[in-house]
Amino acid sequence: MEKLAVTKNVRISAFKAREVARLIQGKAAVEAMNMLALMPRKAAELIGKTLKSAVANAENADQDSVDRSRLYVKEAVIGEGPTLKRFQPKARGSAGHIRKRTSHIRVIVSDEI
């Protein structure tokens, strides 16, 4: 059984969040949550919230409730969300572009190998 959790429009660059997501793929869900709790990065906190939601979805499923110790992270995907475009005034009337990137975090947990 697979369960999914998605967090959309998170204010972090997908490039930065993918570094953290690669570390937890294929790990046991409990081990991944412990790793993310100790990691001093903004992406770790955001991915940790999504992972906890996916584990709760699996535990509280209507038909099949699963023990969290049997779950593992099947997939952790970070997609690019919409980019907020801003500008910073520069010398002689020009403007520097600022791209405030967002991400969509998708975590799938499963008890089947």
Image (cartoon, helix red, strand yellow):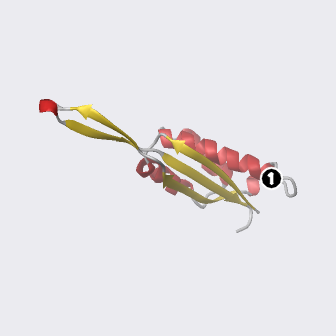
Callout 1 crowding tier (Cα within 10 Å): few <14, some 14–19, many ≥20: few
Q: Quadrant of residue 4?
A: bottom right
Q: Is residue 88 left or right of residue 105?
A: left
The answer to whether 2 appears left or right of 31 in the picture is right
Where is residue 82? Give x, y as percent. Answer: 46, 47
Q: Residue at x 53, y 43 (%)?
A: 9
The one of 24 and 65 positioned closer to us in this rendering: 65
The residue at the far bottom in this view is 113
Residue 21 at x, y percent in the picture? 52, 53
Residue 22 vertical position relative to residue 97 in the rendered view, above or below: below
Q: Residue furthest left?
A: 92
Residue 19 lies left or right of residue 62; in this view the side is left
The mark tally for this picture is 1
- The residue under the point 56% across, 54% down is 24
Measured from the top left, where is residue 10 in percent x and y?
52, 42
Quadrant holding the N terminus: bottom right
Q: Nearer the viewer, residue 42 or 30?
A: 42
Image quadrant for the C terminus?
Answer: bottom right
Instruction: Residue at 46%, 44% (x, y): give it.
Output: 102
Is residue 22 found left or right of 26 in the rendered image? left
Picture quadrant where residue 87 is located: top left
Amino acid at circle 1 = Asp
Q: Please, what secondary structure does the residue beneath circle 1 have?
A: loop
Q: Position of residue 6 (x, y in %)?
A: 62, 50
Please name whichever residue, 56 or 72, is drawn nearer the observer in this view of the structure: 56
Which residue position holds label 1? 67
- Direction front: furthest residue: 93
